[in-house]
Image (tube, grey):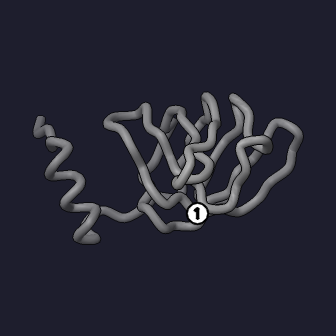
């Protein structure tokens, strides 16, 4: 079995050799605001691959769905932090999902 290290994987994503997948799903653990960055969510990638700049959809527990764009990804592995372009922290709760396709 060949294991790709994180640096190689990042370089392949940047070069367009790894594409986003439609099965991308992220579960929000918490949301907060950082001055100069905006709304940030922390949580777990449940499946799939996402590239910065792709359009995503946020589905909350109340059934509301809206579109956003992830402007930055922080972290390694499955537990990461995402910077969101349009969403407000007040609209996000633990358990809300971020997906690439509805």
Tell which of 72 and 60 is nearer to you: 72
Choose top left, top right, bottom left or bottom right for residue 97: top right
State the residue lying farthest toward the right. Answer: 62
* Residue located 63% across and 37% down the image: 32
In the image, residue 66 sits, relative to residue 33, either above or below, namely below
Task: Tell me residue 96's x, y (percent).
Answer: 71, 37
In the image, residue 33 sits, relative to residue 87, either above or below, namely above
Q: Quadrant of the N terminus?
A: top left
Q: Does residue 11 appear left or right of residue 63 in this picture?
A: left
Residue labelled with disc 1: 69
State the residue lying farthest toward the bottom. Answer: 16
* Residue located 44% across and 37% down the image: 80
Q: Does residue 24 appear left or right of residue 4 in this picture?
A: right
Determine the secondary structure under disc 1: strand
Tell which of 37 and 81 is nearer to you: 37
In the image, residue 51 sits, relative to residue 92, either above or below, namely below
Tell which of 16 and 66 is nearer to you: 66
* Residue located 58% across and 66% down the image: 55
* Residue located 36% across and 64% down the image: 19
Tell which of 85 and 52 is nearer to you: 85
**Mark 1, other Cα within 10 Å: few <14 / some 14–19 / many ≥20:** some
Image label count = 1
Task: Tell me residue 68's x, y (percent).
Answer: 65, 62
Q: Does residue 78 appear left or right of residue 6 in this picture?
A: right
Choose top left, top right, bottom left or bottom right for residue 28: top right
Q: Quadrant of the C terminus?
A: bottom right
Task: Tell me residue 81's x, y (percent).
Answer: 47, 40
Choose top left, top right, bottom left or bottom right for residue 101: bottom right
State the residue lying farthest toward the left. Answer: 2
């Amino acid at each position: 079995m060949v294991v790709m290290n994180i640096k190689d994987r990042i370089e392949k994503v940047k070069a367009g050799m790894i594409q986003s997948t439609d099965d991308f799903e992220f579960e929000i653990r918490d949301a907060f605001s950082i001055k100069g960055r905006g709304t940030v969510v922390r949580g777990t990638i449940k499946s799939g691959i996402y590239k910065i700049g792709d359009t995503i959809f946020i589905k909350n527990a109340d059934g509301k769905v809206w579109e956003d764009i992830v402007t930055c990804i922080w972290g390694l592995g499955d537990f990461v932090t995402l910077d969101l372009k349009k969403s407000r922290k007040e609209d996000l709760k633990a358990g809300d999902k971020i997906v690439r396709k509805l």
